[in-house]
Image (spheres, rainbow, N blue to C red):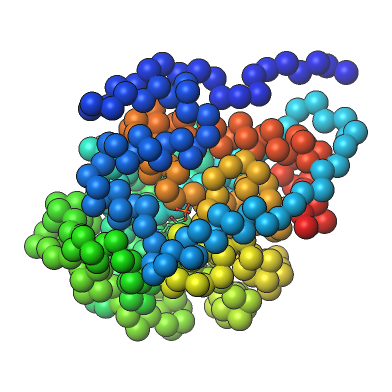
């Protein structure tokens, strides 16, 4: 048998200098290690916006804890010489099953903002889902990336919603991910305490005259009364696949399937909306079972290591999304930081797949997780 010998860890990268902070990317071995450099590189109010959650932040913590509650049943002696991490998302091949979740206002973290993120994602052949509240325009991100997905916050004004979707379609985006867990903004204590405001020019896709506290702006720009009828209506506006982001129950998964959606992201918005809502990993299986083969099911929230990726996949997720990890990497070291974040997650995912006895992601089985 061929002896495969190559590095099991991300290759070394040179020293990066960011402002007054020096981040030695080679020494960053887990994505969690971007957190402190990110804190140092950002305005404290911006860091609070990125890191915080709703209420007592129980759900924020539970997303991570839920992974720690599970245990794995590895299989051995399967003669695996090499692991293939590739899969597909909505019919498109990705190099491994991790994607970038929509996170608003990336320029608060780094001047290049979403453009640096989408470039790194494109170079690594993974999906980047760009937020409605991106701080670079839909068009700039579309041109820099490789068919990113567009995350839609539907507006109370249908013409605004339609124009966002049409712009994304024209700019070559692959799919529309409609966020459904933000009828109103959750009580995020840190943001409220800080009276957090985003500079008006960072609302790259919105009216130029926007100002005020973020929670107020979001409240005024989004549709509080969004319903399944609006999802149906969206079908008539775009031919792109429609994914619903923010479903946590079998009941809603069933309705989503009945409305013919192409994908579901099991998400609680990174613990930023309803505190004490169920951890996403705990919600995953009922959604997977309900969706069956009708649509793809993804998960986000608390994914920090390859072992988390593999756990979610074994429980039926097609792929997972990460939010804060890439954002902190962006703050710490811009594009190079984001690339490093991807490398770490990919190397870890490959490692864990091999240890689980899975040569391909499709070889994982439900009974390998307890
Ligand atoms: C600072 C921040 C901003 C976010 N902005 C958006 C957004 O604009 N649209 C959206 O659908 N989700 C948004 N999310 C939620 C993420 O898409 C995702 O659900 C969450 O970050 C996943 O959890 P993780 O950060 O633990 O990986 C945001 C999350 C964070 C942390």
Question: Where residue 78 sits in the image (x, y, percent)?
Answer: 88, 35
Question: Where residue 12 sits in the image (x, y, percent)?
Answer: 50, 18
In this picture, is 316 found above or below 122? below
| Front position in the image: 14 or 204 | 14
Residue depicted at x 69% and y 33%:
351
- Horizontal relation, residue 48 to residue 325: left or right: left
- Horizontal relation, residue 148 to residue 189: left or right: right
Q: Quadrant location of residue 13? A: top left
Residue depicted at x 23% and y 26%:
20
- Horizontal relation, residue 294 to residue 232: left or right: right
In this picture, is 264 found above or below 1? below
Q: Quadrant of the C terminus?
A: bottom right
Q: Quadrant location of residue 119? A: top left
Question: Where residue 271 sits in the image (x, y, percent)?
Answer: 45, 63
Residue depicted at x 44% and y 76%:
231
Residue depicted at x 30% and y 55%:
49
* Whether residue 335 is visible: no
| Front position in the image: 254 or 108 | 108
Question: Where residue 65 sits in the image (x, y, percent)?
Answer: 59, 56
* Whether residue 5 is visible: yes
């Amino acid at each position: 048998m061929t002896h495969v010998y190559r590095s099991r860890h991300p290759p070394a990268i040179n020293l990066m200098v960011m402002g007054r902070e020096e981040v030695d990317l080679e020494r960053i071995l887990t994505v969690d290690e971007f957190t402190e450099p990110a804190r140092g590189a950002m305005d404290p109010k911006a860091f609070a916006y990125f890191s915080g959650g709703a209420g007592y932040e129980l759900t924020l913590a539970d997303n991570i804890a839920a992974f720690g509650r599970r245990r794995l049943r590895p299989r051995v002696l399967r003669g695996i010489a090499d692991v293939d991490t590739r899969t597909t998302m909505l019919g498109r091949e990705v190099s491994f099953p991790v994607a970038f979740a929509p996170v608003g206002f990336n320029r608060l973290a780094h001047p290049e903002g979403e453009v640096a993120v989408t470039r790194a994602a494109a170079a690594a052949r993974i999906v980047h889902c760009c937020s409605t509240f991106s701080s670079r325009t839909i068009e700039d991100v579309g041109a820099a990336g490789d068919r990113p997905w567009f995350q839609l916050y539907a507006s109370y004004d249908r013409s605004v919603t339609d124009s966002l979707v049409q712009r994304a379609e024209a700019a070559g985006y692959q799919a529309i991910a409609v966020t459904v867990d933000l009828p109103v903004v959750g009580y995020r204590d840190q943001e409220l305490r800080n009276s957090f405001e985003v500079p008006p020019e960072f609302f790259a896709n919105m009216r130029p005259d926007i100002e005020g506290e973020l929670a107020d702006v979001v409240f005024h720009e989004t549709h509080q009364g969004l319903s399944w009828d609006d999802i149906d209506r969206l079908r008539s506006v775009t031919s792109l696949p429609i994914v619903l982001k923010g479903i946590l129950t079998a009941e809603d998964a069933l309705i989503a399937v009945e409305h013919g959606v192409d994908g579901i992201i099991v998400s609680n918005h990174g613990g930023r909306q309803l505190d004490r809502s169920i951890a996403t990993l705990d919600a995953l299986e009922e959604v997977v079972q309900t969706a069956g083969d009708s649509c793809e099911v993804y998960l986000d929230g608390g994914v920090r290591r390859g072992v988390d990726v593999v756990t979610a996949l074994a429980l039926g997720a097609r792929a997972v999304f990460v939010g804060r990890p890439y954002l902190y990497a962006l703050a710490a070291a811009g594009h190079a930081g984001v690339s490093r974040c991807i490398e770490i997650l990919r190397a870890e995912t490959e490692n864990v797949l091999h240890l689980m006895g899975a040569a391909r992601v499709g070889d994982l089985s439900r009974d390998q997780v307890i």
